[in-house]
Image (cartoon, grey):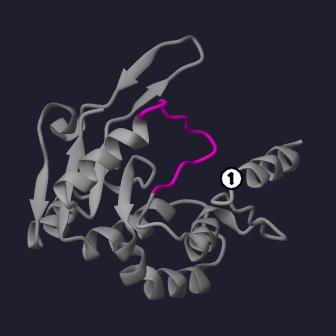
Amino acid sequence: NERAVIEEFCRKDSRIKYIRHTRNRGLFQTRITGMKYASGEYFAFLDSDDHISIDYYRLLMNRITDSGADIVIGDFADEYEDGRIEYYNFDNFRFRDIELTGEQVYEAFMRQHGLWFGWHTVWNKIYRKNLWEASRPELERFSEEHGHLIMTEDVAFSAAFWMAARKVVNCHN
């Protein structure tokens, strides 16, 4: 069963923590709970319906540490059961280098008006931990007010993180 697999990983690696809600509180609250236990300088979210290549996070970590950015955005694609892969080319992220600093960061996020979900999804990025620390009070208050969110949880997190970020870059991976 899943619990046994997780517990085995916990025994093998002390960095892995098994945290469980007693009832389903939704993805938004799960992310908040996870961040309360996170201890590293950087963090990422990987949803249960996602998978990553073996070097995905290594490449993103290299880019964020080399650039000194607060957020690094990775490339992503949809892979279908028939083996077909569709790459997302919206806003040309895959074809150009992005380096936003200062006020440009939040202005660029708001200017795209949510038309390209790669800006506001949280699972295609690595974040510096200070963004969570700056956003935590607002995100926890939002969670308490709205409870179990079914949609838009990525937008709520992203808006807070992009508002706190001072530098954003992308990674062609």
Depth check: give the residue in front, 173 or 49: 173
Q: Amino acid at mark 1?
A: Asp
Q: Which residues are magenta?
A: 44-55
Q: Which quadrant is the C terminus positioned in?
A: top left
List x then y, in percent, for residue 149: 60, 67
**Residue 32 in which image quadrant:** bottom right
Depth check: give the residue in front, 153 or 58: 58
Assign a secondary structure to mark 1: loop
Q: Classify 81 as above or below 127.
A: above
List x then y, in percent, for residue 45: 51, 54
List x then y, in percent, for residue 37: 61, 73
Number of numbered callouts drawn: 1
**Residue 126 in which image quadrant:** bottom left
List x then y, in percent, for residue 102: 10, 72
Q: Classify 127 as above or below 48.
A: below
Left or right: where does residue 22 sit relative to residue 113? right
Q: Classify 81 as above or below 39.
A: above
Residue name at image x 74 percent, y 66 percent: 19
Q: Residue 54 colored magenta?
A: yes
Residue name at image x 24 percent, y 31 percent: 89
Q: Which residue is mark 1?
A: 13
